[in-house]
Image: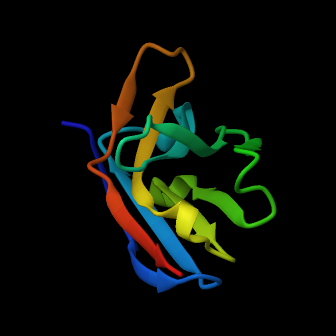
Amino acid sequence: QVQLVESGGGLVQAGGSLRLSCAASRIIASSYTMGWYRQAPGKQRELVATATPGGSTNYADSVKGRFTISRDNAKNTVYLQMNSLKPEDTAVYLCNARHYTATLNYWGQGTQVTVSS
């Protein structure tokens, strides 16, 4: 069974930093675009950042210049470095793995990030 396990969430003051990790098991991460999404209460899930197997990255406009996605295919792990956090970044952050054929798509359980003002 494929598992995506997130870690690194928590409570931080505005302006602070957090680093999220997502460890994937039972998939070959190098065949998947890995990404982070977030969902705040009462809001739709939104893309935060993605990284293709080849290393191309994409970011939501709201996090450009503050967040950095990276991946270690050897460890089947994707990271999200979040700097200059704002209260509006508060959400559950979910890891996603999408096969390059788009036929397989997996989600983690999520990790809570809370930014206090």
> For residue 52, which quarter of the picture?
top right
Protein image colouring: rainbow
Query: Residue 104, image x and y in percent?
Result: 39, 20
Query: Residue 95, image x and y in percent?
Result: 42, 48
Report the front residue among 55 and 117: 117
Report the front residue among 41 and 28: 41
Residue pictured at 68% horizontal, 63% vertical:
67
Image quadrant containing the N terminus? top left
Residue pictured at 55% horizontal, 52% vertical:
73
With 97 as the anchor, is 52 left or right in this view? right
Q: Is residue 34 visible?
A: no
Q: Is residue 5 visible?
A: yes
On screen, residue 49 above or below 99: below
Residue located farthest toward the left when viewing the structure as drawn: 1
Report the front residue among 58 and 41: 41
Query: Residue 40, image x and y in percent?
Result: 41, 50
Residue pictured at 59% horizontal, 82% vertical:
14
Report the front residue among 57 and 64: 64
Residue pictured at 42% horizontal, 54% vertical:
93
On screen, residue 100 above or below 38: above
Query: Residue 39, image x and y in percent?
Result: 42, 46
